[in-house]
Image (cartoon, rainbow, N blue to C red):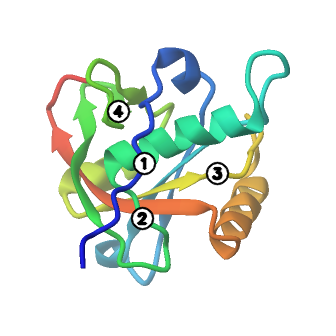
C-alpha cells in the first residue's frame, strides 16, 4: 500500500502572518521539571473583500503542512528546532524560506523554559480567534478546536542564540 500524498499548500508570507494571533503559556503539570510551554497560533475572522474563510484556512494549513503538524488524536510529532531565541527576540520558523513568525511578548519564564531544552507544544487552531483574546477565550477556542478536529499540533525545540 502506498501512502496518500498530502495536498501542497502555499506557505503564507508576511502579509498573512502579520494578522495571526499568537498566545504563549506554561502548563504546570506537577512541578517545573514537568512543565509544558505552549505556543498557540490562530487567526481572526476573515476580512471581507480581502480574505475568505477558505483562504484563511488554506494559509493556516500551509503553515501546518510546512511544520508537519498532526491532529492531536495522533502521536504529536517532533517538528524539530523551530523556535529561535536570540537576544530579546523569540520567533517560530514556520517553514517559509525567508520569514519567521515573531512570538510577541512571551514571559521570561516561558522563554527560559523553552531555552532550557525539551519541547514546546505548538498548536495551530483552524477556528477563528479574536486578536487580544483573554485567557478564557484562548482556552475555549483551543478546547473547541481540539474537540472538533480543527487543531494541529507538533513538539518543537529551540535554537538558542540563533538570529531570527
Cα separation between marks 4 and 1:
30 Å
The residue sitting at the bottom extreme is 30
Whether residue 36 sits left or right of residue 79 in the image: it is: right
Provide the residue designation for mark 1.
7
Looking at the image, which residue is at 75% across and 16% down?
50
39 sits to left or right of 147: left
Report the residue marked by disc 4: 90
N-term mark: 1 or 2 = 1
Badge 4 crowding class, 10 Å Cα cut-off, few under 14, some 14 to 19, many 20 or more, is: many
Residue wearing tag 2: 70
Q: CA distance from mark 4 to mark 2?
A: 23 Å
Kindly report the distance in space between the C-alpha atoms of the residues bearing marks 3 and 2. Answer: 13 Å
**Numbered label attached to residue 126:** 3
| Image spot of residue 131 (x, y percent) | 73, 34
Horizontal relation, residue 3 to residue 104: left or right: left
Categorize mark 3 by other alpha carbons within 10 Å: few (<14), some (14-19), many (20+). Answer: many
Amino acid at each position: 500500500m502506498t501512502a496518500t500524498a498530502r495536498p501542497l499548500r502555499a506557505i503564507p508570507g508576511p502579509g498573512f502572518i502579520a494578522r495571526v494571533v499568537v498566545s504563549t503559556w506554561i502548563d504546570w503539570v506537577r512541578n517545573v521539571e514537568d512543565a509544558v510551554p505552549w505556543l498557540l497560533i490562530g487567526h481572526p475572522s476573515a476580512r471581507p473583500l480581502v480574505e475568505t474563510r477558505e483562504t484563511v484556512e488554506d494559509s493556516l494549513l500551509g503553515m501546518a503542512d510546512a511544520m508537519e503538524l498532526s491532529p492531536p488524536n495522533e502521536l504529536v510529532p517532533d517538528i524539530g528546532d523551530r523556535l529561535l531565541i536570540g537576544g530579546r527576540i523569540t520567533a517560530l520558523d514556520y517553514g517559509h524560506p525567508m520569514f519567521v513568525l515573531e512570538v510577541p511578548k512571551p514571559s521570561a519564564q516561558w522563554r527560559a523554559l523553552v531555552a532550557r531544552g525539551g519541547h514546546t507544544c505548538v498548536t495551530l487552531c483552524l477556528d477563528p480567534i479574536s486578536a487580544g483574546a483573554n485567557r478564557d477565550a484562548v482556552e475555549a477556542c483551543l478546547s473547541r478546536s481540539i474537540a472538533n478536529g480543527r487543531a494541529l499540533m507538533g513538539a518543537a525545540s529551540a535554537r538558542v542564540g540563533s538570529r531570527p
